[in-house]
Protein backbone atom coordinates (compact mmCIF):
# COMPACT_ATOMS: atom_id res chain seq x y z
CA UNK A 1 0.00 0.00 0.00
CA UNK A 2 2.81 2.37 0.77
CA UNK A 3 4.32 1.64 -2.62
CA UNK A 4 1.04 2.62 -4.29
CA UNK A 5 1.02 5.88 -2.39
CA UNK A 6 4.64 6.59 -3.29
CA UNK A 7 4.05 5.77 -6.92
CA UNK A 8 0.96 7.99 -7.05
CA UNK A 9 2.95 10.82 -5.47
CA UNK A 10 5.66 10.44 -8.12
CA UNK A 11 3.05 10.45 -10.89
CA UNK A 12 1.15 13.51 -9.66
CA UNK A 13 3.89 15.69 -8.18
CA UNK A 14 6.95 14.79 -10.22
CA UNK A 15 5.36 13.89 -13.60
CA UNK A 16 6.52 10.29 -13.68
CA UNK A 17 5.06 8.49 -16.68
CA UNK A 18 3.55 5.18 -15.55
CA UNK A 19 0.72 4.37 -18.00
CA UNK A 20 -0.29 1.05 -16.42
CA UNK A 21 -0.95 2.43 -12.93
CA UNK A 22 -4.72 2.04 -13.09
CA UNK A 23 -4.45 -1.34 -14.79
CA UNK A 24 -2.31 -2.61 -11.91
CA UNK A 25 -4.67 -1.05 -9.36
CA UNK A 26 -7.64 -2.72 -11.06
CA UNK A 27 -5.90 -6.10 -10.78
CA UNK A 28 -5.59 -5.65 -7.01
CA UNK A 29 -9.38 -5.54 -6.67
CA UNK A 30 -10.08 -9.24 -6.12
CA UNK A 31 -11.90 -11.47 -3.63
CA UNK A 32 -9.03 -11.42 -1.13
CA UNK A 33 -9.10 -7.64 -0.93
CA UNK A 34 -12.30 -7.40 1.09
CA UNK A 35 -10.99 -9.85 3.69
CA UNK A 36 -7.76 -7.98 4.46
CA UNK A 37 -7.13 -6.35 7.80
CA UNK A 38 -5.82 -3.22 6.11
CA UNK A 39 -8.73 -2.86 3.69
CA UNK A 40 -9.68 0.55 5.09
CA UNK A 41 -6.24 1.95 4.31
CA UNK A 42 -6.24 0.37 0.87
CA UNK A 43 -9.67 1.75 0.00
CA UNK A 44 -8.76 5.20 1.32
CA UNK A 45 -5.79 5.27 -1.05
CA UNK A 46 -7.69 3.69 -3.95
CA UNK A 47 -10.53 6.21 -3.70
CA UNK A 48 -7.98 9.01 -3.49
CA UNK A 49 -6.43 7.77 -6.74
CA UNK A 50 -9.83 7.50 -8.42
CA UNK A 51 -11.15 10.87 -7.26
CA UNK A 52 -9.33 12.86 -9.92
CA UNK A 53 -11.64 14.79 -12.22
CA UNK A 54 -9.31 14.11 -15.14
CA UNK A 55 -9.98 10.37 -15.19
CA UNK A 56 -12.35 9.16 -17.90
CA UNK A 57 -15.74 7.98 -16.74
CA UNK A 58 -15.32 4.52 -18.25
CA UNK A 59 -12.30 3.92 -16.01
CA UNK A 60 -14.09 4.94 -12.84
CA UNK A 61 -17.20 2.98 -13.81
CA UNK A 62 -15.06 -0.14 -14.36
CA UNK A 63 -13.82 0.12 -10.77
CA UNK A 64 -17.37 0.66 -9.49
CA UNK A 65 -18.56 -2.38 -11.43
CA UNK A 66 -15.72 -4.51 -10.03
CA UNK A 67 -16.58 -3.39 -6.50
CA UNK A 68 -20.25 -4.24 -7.04
CA UNK A 69 -19.30 -7.75 -8.14
CA UNK A 70 -17.02 -8.20 -5.16
CA UNK A 71 -19.84 -7.20 -2.80
CA UNK A 72 -21.74 -10.35 -3.75
CA UNK A 73 -19.31 -12.60 -1.86
CA UNK A 74 -17.75 -10.15 0.62
CA UNK A 75 -18.16 -10.00 4.40
CA UNK A 76 -20.43 -7.20 5.72
CA UNK A 77 -17.57 -4.85 6.63
CA UNK A 78 -16.16 -5.13 3.11
CA UNK A 79 -19.58 -4.48 1.59
CA UNK A 80 -20.01 -1.33 3.65
CA UNK A 81 -16.68 0.13 2.54
CA UNK A 82 -17.31 -0.85 -1.08
CA UNK A 83 -20.79 0.62 -1.27
CA UNK A 84 -19.82 3.88 0.41
CA UNK A 85 -16.76 4.25 -1.80
CA UNK A 86 -18.72 3.46 -4.94
CA UNK A 87 -21.35 6.01 -3.99
CA UNK A 88 -18.73 8.70 -3.43
CA UNK A 89 -17.11 7.90 -6.79
CA UNK A 90 -20.49 8.15 -8.50
CA UNK A 91 -21.16 11.52 -6.91
CA UNK A 92 -17.73 12.86 -7.89
CA UNK A 93 -18.02 11.88 -11.53
Image (tube, grey):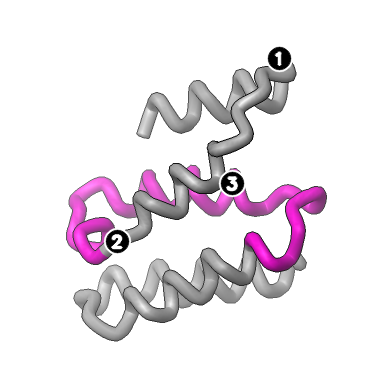
Query: Mark number for residue 30?
Result: 2
How crowded is the residue under tag 1: few (<14 C-alpha within 10 Å), some, or many (20+)? few
Relative image position of residue 35 (x, y in whole percent): 18, 61
The secondary structure type at the circle numbered 2 is loop
What's the mark number on residue 48?
3
Q: Quadrant of the C terminus?
A: bottom right
- Position of residue 80 relative to residue 19, above or below, is below
Report the Cα–Cα distance between label 3 and label 2.
19 Å
Seen at 45% across and 54% down, the residue is: 26
Left or right relative to 38: residue 67: right
Residue 62 locus on image (x, y percent): 56, 68
- Which structural element holds mark 1? helix
- Is 30 displayed left or right of 62 in the figure? left
Label 2 crowding class (10 Å Cα cut-off): few <14, some 14-19, many 20+? few
**Along the viewing direction, whichever of 72 and 88 lies nearer the viewer:** 72
Q: Kindly indicate the quadrant of the structure image that contains residue 20.
A: top right
Q: How many marks?
A: 3
Point 46% across, 76% down: residue: 83
Residue 14, label in figure: 1
Q: Is residue 74 above or below residue 17?
A: below
Q: Which residues are magenta?
A: 31-59
Tell me the chief SS of the magenta region. Answer: helix
Amino acid sequence: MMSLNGLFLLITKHNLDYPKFYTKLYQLFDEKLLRLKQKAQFFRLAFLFLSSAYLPEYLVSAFIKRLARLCLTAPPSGVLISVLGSLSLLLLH
